[in-house]
Amino acid sequence: MGGCLTLINGKIYLSYNPLKTSESLVIAGGRVIFTGSISNALAISGLLGCDLIDLKGKVVLPGFVDAHMHLDGVGMSLSTVDLRGVRSIDELKDRVRRFAGKSGSWVFGHGWDQELFEEGRWPTRWDLDEVVSDKPVLLIRVCGHAAVLNTKAMEITGLIDSDSPHVLRDEEGEATGIVREEALDTARNKFRESLTMEDHKRFLEEAIKYAASLGVTTVGFVSVNETAFKALEELRYEGKLLVRVRAYLNPGEGDDLLLTLKKLGVRAGFGNDYLKICGIKVFVDGSLGARTAWLTEPYSDEPSTRGSQLVDEETLEKLVKEAHEAGLQLAIHAIGDAAIDLVLRVYSRIKDSRGSRHRIEHASVLRPDQIAKIRELGTPLVVQPHFIITDWWVLKRLGNSRAVWVYPFKTLVDSGVPLGISTDSPVEPLNPWETVYAAVTRGEHDDIELSKHTPHEKLSLTEVLHLYTHGSAYVLREESSIGSLEVGKLADFIIVDKDPYAIDEKTLREIKVLATYVGGVKVYECLTPSS
């Protein structure tokens, strides 16, 4: 628990909606106990014996709450080959070649996007075999729903002989090395079998430190498997959880985690201020990038498919009902409008779905009738504004006629739909200012085609900062404890080098975090602050 701190002589933003500032902040026992005049703050500080922080004009903001990310994936991405921004298969091969010598028993990478490749095609196992053939290689696409494996990995996982439709084959029937959805899960699980508990702890610890350095003070960690949760609990016991972690578990992991949680009576909110179980994560479809997001109408650039339905309605309804009755919150991945239709049908049959705040993750393609239904149900959505920039090709996938359905953030806000902001990192950068920039500009300065069709869907700075703090806290069902610096809230805050309200929107992503505090305890300090 944090000691006693008093902050003065800076601009302190307490909340964004309403927009409140203070000239001082007093913290005791890990929570905010006073905001107001410097003179009163100093008087309280003297009585309590608080440490004094002179901000010297710097800016304090509430810590960011990332409602949907993959903490283990972030940790792995920090320790594996980074393929984001790769512009060709040759460049991809070069990065893999340079990394392979210092890798372990597997070569693991993440972040490639075939839409950027000058060759105009997907990579294959034969491409990877040219640079690494003696150990398995697994390279996951930026969306996390497709990957390319070399021949060794295809053999080790048994996917080379699989008849799954998610193992892609060429005209001769040969597996190309591209796998999607459950076939990717098979490969990913095989890779994870090679990792020790210490590996998992190391990945998570590095990711936690990284989050703290970026000013993210609470994370909604989704798709948590049994091993990852054990590693988190060990880190918590060792006092190494520098940020707050809210876990959404895979329901069928191990001996069926959902069944185990029900037997134990574990409900949403079980845990402490640093590590809590919130609920379970379920997939209904895939991604737009891999053309596995489930649409009501075919893809414009591949009319032969509408994507993939990953769970049938009866199975989903049974799982949702069981989780709901067990007091667990649902976080259901649904990107395409057909997937969203399915989730809304199931949620509409749940008694007190509004009170349980069962979530929809991503909701990338939304029709107006669906927005009305979401508002009626009070279903919170967790959205990723940086998808706008990364999915620069989205109109090619969906066509101009569906442009107004894609990432309609302002319409959602104006409709009163509860929204939380996240990155889905490592799919998108964990840095919150990249996300803020994307939400405010909608890619206008990056020549993003979608921005030209939907400029009315930009969010104001106040709107996105509110959604990235209080909004995400609401989605996590913790708005009474986190998401602002009002009296009584947990003292999670950051000190930054620029006031976001005093700079041009083009420079929002240049804001640097100078220090991060969680519960009034400093968990990160920039050793080389900008001038």
Image: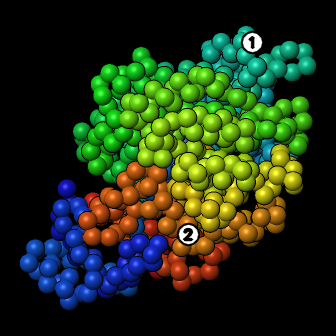
Point 54% across, 83% down: residue: 502
Amino acid type, callout 1: Asp
Residue found farthest to the bottom: 39
Mark earlier in primary sequence (2, 1): 1
Point 28% across, 49% down: residue: 273
Please state if 452 lies on the left or on the right of 504 as rendered: right
Question: Residue 29: where, in percent of width, then height?
Answer: 18, 62
Number of the label disc, if any, that sits on residue 347: none
Foreground pick, 257 / 95: 257
Foreground pick, 50 / 29: 29
Tag 1 residue? 163
Amino acid type, callout 2: Glu
Please state if 214 lies on the left or on the right of 6 as rendered: right
- Under tag 2, what secondary structure? helix
Number of the label disc, if any, that sits on residue 463: 2
Q: Can you see residue 80?
A: no
Question: Residue 503: where, in percent of width, then height?
Answer: 57, 81
Foreground pick, 173 / 64: 64
Instruction: Report the number of numbered marks.
Output: 2
- Under tag 1, what secondary structure? loop
Point 68% across, 68% down: residue: 458
